[in-house]
Each structure stands twice: as C-alpha cells, then as structure tokens.
Image: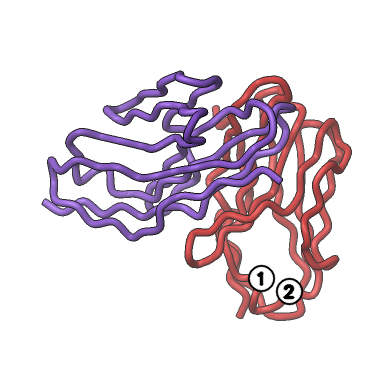
Chain colours: A purple, B red
Amino acid sequence: GDSVTQMEGPVTLSEEAFLTINCTYTATGYPSLFWYVQYPGEGLQLLLKATKADDKGSNKGFEATYRKETTSFHLEKGSVQVSDSAVYFCALSSNTGNQFYFGTGTSLTVIP
Amino acid sequence: DTAVSQTPKYLVTQMGNDKSIKCEQNLGHDTMYWYKQDSKKFLKIMFSYNNKELIINETVPNRFSPKSPDKAHLNLHINSLELGDSAVYFCASSQAGRIEAFFGQGTRLTVV
C-alpha cells in the first residue's frame, strides 16, 4: 500500500543553518505530495505541495521537488530561523484524493 | 472564518466515561477524517468519510464511533474511555479530485 517514510528527528540547528528533511514515498500511480507543518499547540498547516513529477513546491523559503525517479520529496531551506521550530510532516494523497498518508513527523528546533 | 473547527479544544475526563468531539467544516468538502496524534507526534488515521459514507476504518477499537449527520460534520464518539485514549485528535477535510487536506486545531483528550 501507499506509505511515506521520513527522516527521524529530533533535529536541532543553529539559526541561519541549512535544513534538509528527507522524505521518500511508496505509491501506486501518481500521488500528490505535501509538507505540512505543526507549530507548538496548533493543528497542521499546509506548507507546500507538488502534484506531478519535477514540480517544485515552495513557501516561506522552504522548497521540495517531486522526484519520481528516486520517489523522494525532500524539504529544504537555505537559512532557518527560530520561528521555524515546529514538527514537519511529509504526506501523500492517493489518485482519488480522498486518502492521505503521513510520515512520522520530524521535530525541528532552531536555536539562536 | 475557521475552515475546520473542532470542539472542545481540551477535554479532561475520567476513565469509563463516554465523550464526544465535534467537527465542522465550511469548505464544502466531501471527505472528512479523524486522526489520532500520540505523544510522539505520530499521526494515525482513524476514519475517513466521503459524502457521509465510511470509506476508511482503520484498526480502531469499536469504542470509537464516528457519526456524520451531513457532509459538513463528522463527530467522534468514544465510549468507556481508557487511559490509552489520551492523545490529540485532529479532524480534517478534503475534496476528492483536489489535493490538500485542511486540519482543525485539534482536541487534546486527557483521560485520568
């Protein structure tokens, strides 16, 4: 069945460091891919998305590219800020769009 | 205007009690979900409803019963609460054929 595997945390970085959170997926067909972010005490918010191979999703300085050949959707940011401290979830939705599969989440702490 | 709203935000109750969590979405979506997030932030889907019909029912104790009176509502009723039910429960919605899911703010359930 469809699934998402993402890099385990927690991840601790200094402010302005480069961030990569790895995500790979297993799916039949052509899923859509997402990164969601959960700030402390809040629900999940969509951070970025990509719907087809080679699409790049971007938002708030974060980027991820849908790589079908490596079945990956790694999240990157060139310079993290303290305010980026949160839990990040990689996710995919099936072709029908009514099933979502989440990774285990990666906790990021950015220290000044 | 909150897109997906859940009530209550916090719920503290004793073992053995029966409780309900309500969820409403005003996005016109046709699919709604319940997820359970444990203390390690792992998100597990519990139920998915499409147009008021159950389409996903993961391995969840039958003490948990979802009820969808209409497309805009998916409530979660829990009987005979146990300590292990303590978690954050998230409601979400999406539209089949489109891609992203929208999440509520979560209900933190504590069973004492």
Q: Neighbour class for label 1 at 10 Å: few (<14), some, many (≥20)?
A: some
**Of the two numbered discs 2 and 1 in the rendering, the one whose residue sits closer to the viewer:** 1
Q: Amino acid at mark 2?
A: Leu
- Image point (57%, 39%), residue name: B103
Which quadrant of the figure has residue A98? top right
Q: Does B109 sit left or right of A96 as displayed?
A: left
- Image point (40%, 52%), residue name: A7
Q: Neighbour class for label 2 at 10 Å: few (<14), some, many (≥20)?
A: many
Q: Is residue A49 above or below residue A111?
A: above
Q: Amino acid at mark 1?
A: Asp
Q: Is residue B105 above or below residue A67?
A: below
Q: Does B35 sit left or right of A90 as displayed?
A: right
Residue B74 image offset from top left, x and y in percent: 76, 43
Q: Is residue B75 above or below residue B96?
A: below
How far apart are the two marked residues, 2 and 1, measured between alpha carbons?
Answer: 7 Å
Q: Which mark is residue B81?
A: 2
Name the residue furthest front. A69
Residue B8 image offset from top left, x and y in percent: 61, 54
Considering depth in this image, is B111 or A82 the residue closer to the camera?
A82
Q: Which mark is residue B85?
A: 1
Q: Which mark is residue B53?
A: none
- Image point (78%, 69%), residue name: B18
**Which chain does the numbered disc 2 sit on?**
B
**Which chain does the numbered disc 1 sit on?**
B
Q: Is residue B73 above or below residue A11?
A: above
Residue A100 image offset from top left, x and y in percent: 64, 39
Considering depth in this image, is B6 or A101 the residue closer to the camera?
A101
Badges 2 and 1: C-beta atoms under 8 Å apart? yes
* Disc 1 element: helix
- Image point (71%, 48%), residue name: B22
Residue B90 image offset from top left, x and y in percent: 61, 50
